[in-house]
Each structure stands twice: as structure tokens, then as C-alpha cells.
Image (tube, rainbow, N blue to C red):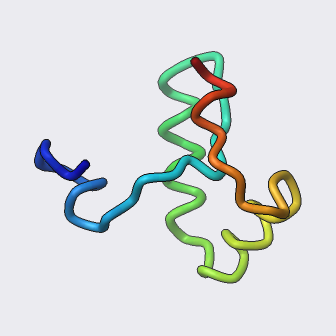
Amino acid sequence: MGIIEGFTKRYSVHNLVWYEAHETMESAILREKQLKKWSRIAKIRTIEQQNPNWQDLWLDLV
């Protein structure tokens, strides 16, 4: 892990604990901009509402 340059290597992120699907790229970008303004606590609450055990969700997408 950590072979390819980018966010996951830089921050040692290896688990997908939350995601949202969007119909369009525009709606996904708008949501991302909205989330960037949230506090860390608000982001954690959002994750824990849908994934209280912080399980890796990657296999759900494969």
C-alpha cells in the first residue's frame, strides 16, 4: 500500500468508511464543496450514523 502518489499515500488512508453516490458529476462536486465546510465532528457524526463500527465498505462496491 502507498505505492501510488496521491491522497491515500500522503495521509495513509486505507479504509473506505463512508461514501455517497450521485446521479451527476455536478451534484457530487456541489456536495463535496458543502462537506469541506463542515467541522470534523460533523463529518464523524455523518459516518457513524451510517457506519457506526467504521467497517471498510470497499467490498460493498466491488
Residue displayed at 55% across by 47% down = 16
Q: Residue furthest front?
A: 1
* Left or right, residue 17 beside residue 5: right
Q: Quadrant of residue 62?
A: top right
Residue displayed at 71% across by 60% down = 54
Rendered position, 53 above or below 39 = above
Rendered position, 8 above or below 28 = below
Q: Quadrant of residue 9?
A: bottom left
Please provide percent x and percent y for residue 4. 13, 42
Please provide percent x and percent y for residue 28. 55, 34
Residue displayed at 25% across by 48% down = 1
Please provide percent x and percent y for residue 51. 81, 54
| Most foreground residue, 2 or 33 | 2
Please provide percent x and percent y for residue 11. 29, 67
Total marks in image: 0
| Most foreground residue, 9 or 44 | 9
Residue displayed at 49% across by 54% down = 33
* Left or right, residue 55 beside residue 36: right
